[in-house]
Amino acid sequence: MYKILAVDDAKDTLLLLEFDLSAEGYQVMTTDAADSALRLLEKEHFDLILLDMYMPGITGMAALEVIKRKEALQHIPVIMLSAADGEDEIVAALELGADDYVTKPYIAKVLLARIRTSLRLMEKNRELEILATTDFLTGINNRGRFYELASKAFIESVRQKSGLVLAMFDIDLFKQVNDNYGHEAGDKVLVEYTQLMGKVFREYDILGRLGGEEFAVCFPYTVIEEAINACERFRLCLEQHAILPGKQAQETLFVTVSIGVASTTIASPGLDDLIRRADLGLYEAKNTGRNKTINADKLQPINETQAPLIDYIDTMNDEEPAPKVPQPQEFPGIDQKIGLGNVLGDKSLFKEILVMFYQDHHDDKEKLQSALSAKDHATAKHLAHTLKGVASSVGAMALFERAKVLDKALSGGEKEQYQLLFEGVAAELIKVMAGIEQELAEQLHNVSS
Ligand SMILES: Nc1nc2c(ncn2[C@@H]2O[C@H](COP(=O)(O)OP(=O)(O)OP(=O)(O)O)[C@@H](O)[C@H]2O)c(=O)[nH]1
């Protein structure tokens, strides 16, 4: 039931309004002064306001100005009621933000019709706002809304000198979920994952889906240790959370998540910097085995001039990240445990796949370079994206990471990064392809002849 606030200094008008509106099924509250109306609006929720223009004390126009300036109130439709029917008054009220203007004495039928129209418009605006700010699949804040809310929380934390923490989340090897169980199952995982987030984190933590399988949480009034505890609680819950990939599915699946966490304890010039640092923690988590939370505040301080590049450069070091368990490195640049795992340990099938990978992608370096030189970024993106996918399938994880950052840069239009990132991909491609060439020379020869 809609709740309407009627404000008028004439008691008889209030009685009449109460009668007409109640008869139409609205819940009505009345008050005879603007100051008490503003106090009521602070305390209670209303769906619409009927506001007299001229009242002793604060005028209706002054109250209107306050309502339309306050973020929490400005969406409430206001219909001005006035005996004054001069065009200047009407224009002034509408320009100040009134949604409609009705002259007194009013005709009940007309006033009720105008109320219905205002409420209908308000509903449509609400729906549009939800569409514009909510992630369609999971129902949580989308990227834009997350940034808006987190920015406000950041500014508030600076004002209040209170702690604020930002965490970036990325589901591990999510591509494999899609590849093995289908896209619908992938969507189901994302939905259940978000529901679990909603259960584990507090109501006033800000959750957002930044895109794909990437999520973020902003923790206002929180120190990093508390946020890490919350993230770890979530990570452990997720690890044990069995997901049924489809209605008819027999077996359940499990996913894990990598998390990077950064706080404002380390002077942050802004939210973007905080996000960038949390992202570094996330990369570190991915590069050191996944399914873990990394405190980015404890990572090596970054030379500020290098900072914008760091997302990309950190995966382009000459040194490979040290694997947890040393792997027999038959194929340079390829983690056989992962590659073999993808074909359920079938070694001969794995070798066949490597041969196919070689055939299809050994000249990707040249193709990528010529697409970039021709500024054909759509083709370059397609190549990088495909390479990323197949590299992870064969276990070429460093190549996967480098193709991934190039793919991401191409999606984001970060032109100045393209060549540098391409060189990282090219170096890794040369290494991986040379290894396959050397180890599988015979098979490659058989295929080509
Ligand atoms: N089902 C589904 N998949 C999505 C959605 N958005 C993105 N994806 C998929 O998420 C996958 C992300 O894969 P990658 O970026 O390669 O990373 P990953 O497999 O999670 O590997 P790591 O992040 O390195 O652990 C891609 O296969 C996308 O197609 C979505 O809305 N639904």
Image (spheres, helix red, strand yellow):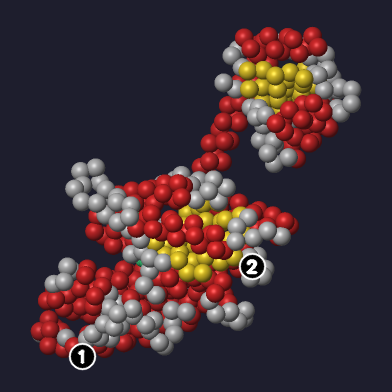
Residue 228 placement (x, y as % from top left): 50, 62
Image position of 350 with respect to 129: above or below: below
Image position of 434 with respect to 172: above or below: below
Residue 317 placement (x, y as % from top left): 44, 85
Q: Residue tagged by mark 1?
A: 438
Q: Is residue 196 left or right of residue 46?
A: left
Give the Cα distance between marks 1 and 2. 51 Å
Q: Tell me the residue at 22%/68% (across/down).
A: 342
The dot on residue 210 is none
The one nearer the camera, 61 or 359, is 61
Q: Tell me the residue at 57%/56% (across/down).
A: 219
Q: Residue tagged by mark 2?
A: 265
Disc 1 residue type (three-letter): Gln
The answer to whether residue 221 shows anywhere in this view is yes
Mark in the foreground, 1 or 2: 2
Residue 271 placement (x, y as % from top left): 62, 63
Q: Is residue 68 left or right of residue 143?
A: right
Question: Tag 1, which secondary structure?
Answer: helix
Ligand 1 occupies quarter:
bottom left
Q: Is residue 84 left or right of residue 41?
A: right
Q: Quadrant of the C terminus?
A: bottom left
Q: Tell me the residue at 70%/37% (across/down).
A: 74
Q: Tell me if mark 1 has few (under 14), some (14-19) or many (20+) residues whose alpha carbon lies within 10 angstroms of its own.
A: few
Image position of 65 with respect to 384: above or below: above
Q: Quadrant of the N terminus?
A: top right
Q: Tell me the residue at 73%/57% (across/down).
A: 159
First of labels 1, 2 by sequence position: 2
Disc 2 residue type (three-letter): Thr
